[in-house]
Amino acid sequence: MARIFTLIVMVTSLFVCAGVSAASEPTSEDKVSTYNRLVDEVIQRYEIKSATCDSTCEAIRRDAALACMKTAYFRAYKKALVWKMNERNVEPKRHKISQFLNQSFYELVRYQNRKA
């Protein structure tokens, strides 16, 4: 009797755990909206950084110019970048999104440098 009870408890807990993990998995629409929100945050961060273009420090002006180029790239290709993140199943975390966006930007820069 105790074995049957233990077996029933184990099977029930297995189904409950499987249901919880399936329910907590984000849908594609949830991930896309999260990607869009995080890309917007990255764009906003680089817009703030690009506002320092009139600094007296050359290094800050150079960083501001780079931030301006990144902002333009992320705005122009936002839909394609979000689609690619969803396709590659990038974790919807701030640092992963930022890493993916910077990597795609620098891939473009390297490609343009090879063409020139």
Image: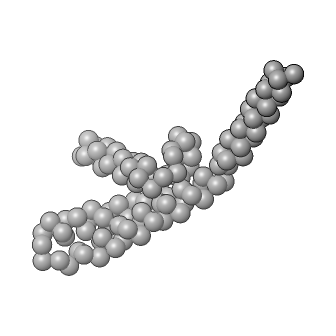
Residue found at the far front of this picture: 2
Instruction: Give whichever of 94, 61 is nearer the camera.
Output: 94
Q: Position of residue 106 (x, y in %)?
A: 32, 48
Position of 2 relative to 80 (above/below): above
Instruction: Give whichever of 85, 18 is nearer the camera.
Output: 18
Residue found at the far right of this picture: 1
Res 3 → quadrant: top right
Instruction: Give whichever of 42, 7 is nearer the camera.
Output: 7
Relative placement, left or right, of 100 versus 56 is right
> Which quarter shows the N terminus?
top right
Q: Is residue 72 visible?
A: no
Snapshot colouring: one colour
Position of 58 relative to 92 (above/below): below
Residue located 36% across and 52% down the image:
102
Position of 59 relative to 97 (above/below): below
Q: Position of residue 107 (x, y in %)?
A: 34, 45
Q: Position of residue 93 (x, y in %)?
A: 48, 52
Residue located 52% across and 51% down the image:
92
Residue located 82% across and 23% down the image:
2
Residue located 64% across and 55% down the image:
30
Q: Is residue 6 visible?
A: yes
Residue found at the far left of this picture: 57
Number of callouts in the render? 0
Q: Position of residue 56 (x, y in %)?
A: 12, 77
